Image (cartoon, rainbow, N blue to C red):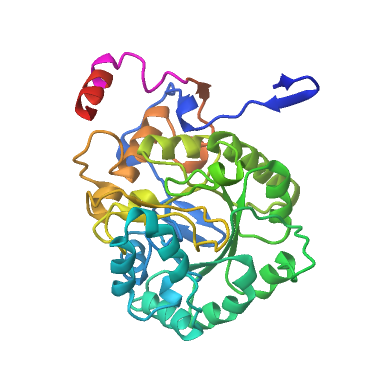
Amino acid sequence: MAEYISKGRKARKSYGFDDVALVPGDLTYDIKEVDASWKIGDLEFDVPIIAAAMDGVVNVHFAREFSKRGGFAVLNLDGISSRFEDLSSIYERMLSSKREEVTSVIQEIYKEPIKEELVEKSISSIKEGGNFCAVSSVPQNAERFAEIAESAGADLFIVQSTVTTARHISKRYKALDFDKFCSKLKIPVIIGNCVTYKTTLELMKTGAAAILVGIGPGAACTTRQVLGIGVPQITATGDAAAARDYYFKKTGKYVPIITDGGMSTGGDIAKAIAAGADAVMVGSAFAKTKESPAPGYHWGMATSSENLPRGTLIQVGPICTLDEMLTGPAWLDDGTQNLLGALRLSMASVGADSIKRMQLTELIIAPSIKTEGKVQQRQQRVGMGK
């Protein structure tokens, strides 16, 4: 329900992960009976958690390792893997920069021209050994990279920008025609990011194989502060999922929804699925792993804007291995490890033996869910922070 924020102006309430909780069902499952697999068309994955297309999260090595574990990590074709042969020196330069110099150093690094031979080399390297390869590009470079990616053996192509719509107007350049792009490519195309029912529906009509949902919730992303835009992820996911269900009813084509960003715990992931997501995309959690490109460091955007930066360098670890992050054992009690195990146990507890049944879980508005009765925990955290 909309409320007045001033005379003549209404605003709809929206909700993020900390605003809601899942209601346990009247049926529970043994965790071994829970199936968390999901599909994009004919492609099926055991892990419904995708590693985000960010240079601090995914490189060739990480993409290979993630594929071996039943999911996929997305390589950013606009990133440094496509710009530099020697990545170790680039990471060293970035991470050794003074705090006040980091943004300008990152901007300078991303000014290096993209080299198409490195794009092809990276994809071919991921595919060695039969690994699954997913790649990402901003709309401006999508047509340039699509043919290279397809011929090099990529299995999935993602067109991703901060805000993506099916209708883009510019007098300076020709906008990407998603209808033609999706029909031309022989591999599935995922499009993002969006946060509304209408935009989700319009992007589905272009032939997208899946839709990414989320604007600015990432740990290292500053879009919401810089631009003032975004919709909390529970509401954004629910609206997008409603569009997916309507589209399926009308066409018989099921287009998965992928909640992208803002999830730091297994509980957040479970809430995203319950809100309607088929899978989630996570960045900072995987930047914490020892297998990540610059272990323990993460920076926001896929590429750094020259005029209006919207990503910052943060230190998040390293705290564990990729296996520990996905399936445990966890050695922290805050839900930031064993993400897949937490999701499966949450599903078992609410009586959902599949992702689709998890999407039917009852959600309640519960802003006190993380603080109710936690007096001692709060006092200890305050004490440790002094």
Q: Give the x, y percent position of residue 185.
A: 63, 74
Residue at 44% in and 60% down: 54
Q: In this view, does 309 lie above or below 116?
A: above
Report the number of numbered marks: 0
Q: Which of 249 and 119 is in front in this view?
A: 119
Q: Is residue 267 above or below residue 308?
A: above
Q: In this view, does 54 lie above or below 198?
A: below
Most distant residue in the bottom direction: 117
| Side of 57 where 236 appears, left or right | right
Q: Give the x, y percent position of residue 3.
A: 70, 20
Which quadrant: the C terminus? top left
Residue at 45% in and 25% down: 21
Residue at 41% in and 61% down: 72
Q: Give the x, y percent position of residue 23.
A: 45, 22
| Side of 341 where 196 appears, left or right | right
| Side of 135 where 122 appears, left or right | left
Residue 376 part of the magenta-drawn span: yes
| Bounds of the magenta segment | 367-377
For the question of whether residue 267 can be seen, the reply is yes
Quadrant of residue 377 within the rendered picture: top left
Residue 254 part of the magenta-drawn span: no
For the question of whether residue 215 can be seen, the reply is no
Which quadrant: the N terminus? top right
